Amino acid sequence: MTTAAAQPTQSSSTRGRTDRPPENVMQELGDALKFSARVLVSLPAAARHVTEVLRQAAMIAMSSSLVIWILLIAGGVLVSEVAHYLLTTVGAQAYAGFFNSAGINKVTNPMYFGYIVAAKVGCGIVAELGSMRINEEIDAMEVMGINVMAYLAGTRVLAWAIVGPFIYMIGTGLGFVAGHIAIVDVYKTSSAGAYSDTFWAFTTPADLMFRSLVWAMVPTIAVILISCYYGFTARGGPVGVGVNTARSMVFNVLIVSVLGGAVLFQLFYGTGVIVPIAN
Amino acid sequence: MSDKLEQASSAGRRGRNLLAAVAPSGGPGQFALGGARNTLEQAGNMAVLLAQLCKSVAHNPRGFWGDVRDQVADMTKRTFVPATITVIGYGTLVVTFAVVVLLFLGAPNRLGAVYLSFVLRETAPYLTGIVIAGVLGTALTSELGARKVREELDALRALGQDPIRLLVLPRVIAMIIVTTALFMYMVIFEILEGLAGTIILGDTSAGAFASSFMVNLTVPDVLGSAIKMSIIGLFIGVVCASKGLGVSAGAEGVGRAVNQAVVISVLGVFIISILFNMILLGLTPDMRVLR
């Protein structure tokens, strides 16, 4: 531990323990959680930088939305494929709509969304903030008196909170369309009317807007926070940026799997996938 | 490698001249065509790398298997814990969903067959792909990118060694082996999770699950999935190695290369899985029957 004289008097709040990297996984996890808490606390200050928030939101929407939509479309096609072969053997082709609705909204969409956001947006944030840290731009901003937590990390979290739900809902819609085309036109499991009838009979607004959306957004906000942490703590030149990007991806995949897969699913559905019959 | 680079760059020059004649600079046309050309250029680089790897193996298939063994050990150490945590997290979701859906359809005794087809064909391949791309793909790209930035690859070439054969080939072969092995491990783990879920949540016994499972396990299923995972491992290896070798100089070069590599890998896992499943299910009527 450094003595009080060796520590900088101005609290370098963004550096943490940059004189030595975290020694094991638990220290890294603790550092990341402390950093995330500080970013969340600075969100009201970040809300003042409205133009930066909007700029970040535009950048996320322009660069990442197409990739995310491609993956959510692939999710719809995947569920339709399973639905076709499974229900044809059992003889329940008419219920392809039910299988698609439950499968897309509950099994595939939130998890796929989390994984692709971790890959595209998360790693992009680590690369960007890491290169800013390497080029000492973050230190220059601190010297100028800008609150870097709010200006760099908080604005990105707010931007994702603005843009993310839209990307997710549009992607879900595209996944529904892809599932419809796959079942009705490609696999010819059931007719368009039967598919649409059962599909919309089993999709409730609460399922779609509340549970599915919250279930998709919570792990991705955690992913953005962890990516900001790894971006801020990059050290050792361009190679360090790459190493931190790789480490952040591992961490983000685990967060999405555990938080999105196990915790939130149990929170929303427990052991009973709510299937409203004839609503 | 250098003469190929010269050929590629002269071809690129010819392509760019053609492009300038067809699409004037500025405006949306150049954006679309430029983006397409960039994508095709990167895809071409990956194809060139794959061809170089095949040629290197065909010329002299000995001498690198010790490195392959070391890389397999290193990669297994890295992916074992994240794979287990991921499969526990996602497996509880899939188990709960499958049990409840089949209880709703009134066929919980067929859970073994349903779960087998779902897990073996869809869930385990893409979970393995995500873990491999996230853990190993990013490590491969960042390691090769670091070596390129530090000019170690040029130093190897100056010493007369081929860095592709020395560095990339063992890692790509090890990635194929580890992907297939990790897939088997994840399938076994998820099936055991399904068994536990059926006993606890479903209304049937473990015997119904086990008998339905074993009756429906066909050879095309297992073999086809193993071949699919090998293809996915090869894809991830070549994409990440190509991105790592082509890192541009500068502070954000390596980070951006890792970002692009992992996005392409994740998308590729899904698309390869969907296409392979379509072909496999279409060709083998054996797999489409639930017994």
Image (tube, rainbow, N blue to C red):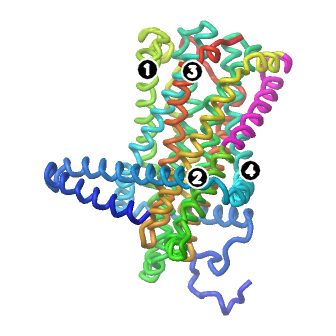
**Residue holding disc 1:** A180
Dot 1 crowding, Cα within 10 Å, few <14, some 14–19, many 20+: many
Say whether disc 4 or disc 2 marks the residue closer to the N-terminus: 2
- Asked whether residue A207 appears in the rendered view, the answer is no
Eye-nearest disc, 4 or 3: 3
- Nearer the camera: disc 3 or disc 1: 3
**Above or below, B105 relative to B16:** above
Residue A71, image x, y percentages? 47, 38
Kind of residue at badge 1 = His
Task: Specify start and end residues of the magenta stretch as a single range.
Answer: B180-207
Residue A68 sits in which quadrant? top left
From the viewer's perspective, is the residue at label 2 or at label 3 nearer? Answer: 2
Q: Which mark is residue B57?
A: 2
Residue in the picture at 59% in, 51% down: B134
Mark in front: 1 vs 4: 4
Per the image, label 2 sits on a secondary structure element best described as helix
* Residue plotted at (60% across, 53% down): B172
The residue that label 3 is drawn on is B281
Callout 1 secondary element? helix
Circle nearer the N terminus (2, 3): 2
Q: At which x and y percent is residue B137?
A: 58, 54
Q: In the rendered structure, which amino acid carries the disc numbered 4?
A: Phe
Residue wearing tag 4: B80
Query: x, y percentage for residue A210?
Result: 53, 34
Task: Please give the chain letter of the residue carrying mark 3.
Answer: B
> Do residues under tags 1 and 4 come within 8 Å of each other at their CB atoms?
no
Q: Looking at the rendered structure, which numbered label has been put on residue A82?
A: none
Task: Name the kind of residue labelled 3 in the image.
Answer: Leu
Comparing labels 2 and 1, the label whose residue is closer to the camera: 2
* Residue A52 in the image: above or below residue B34: below
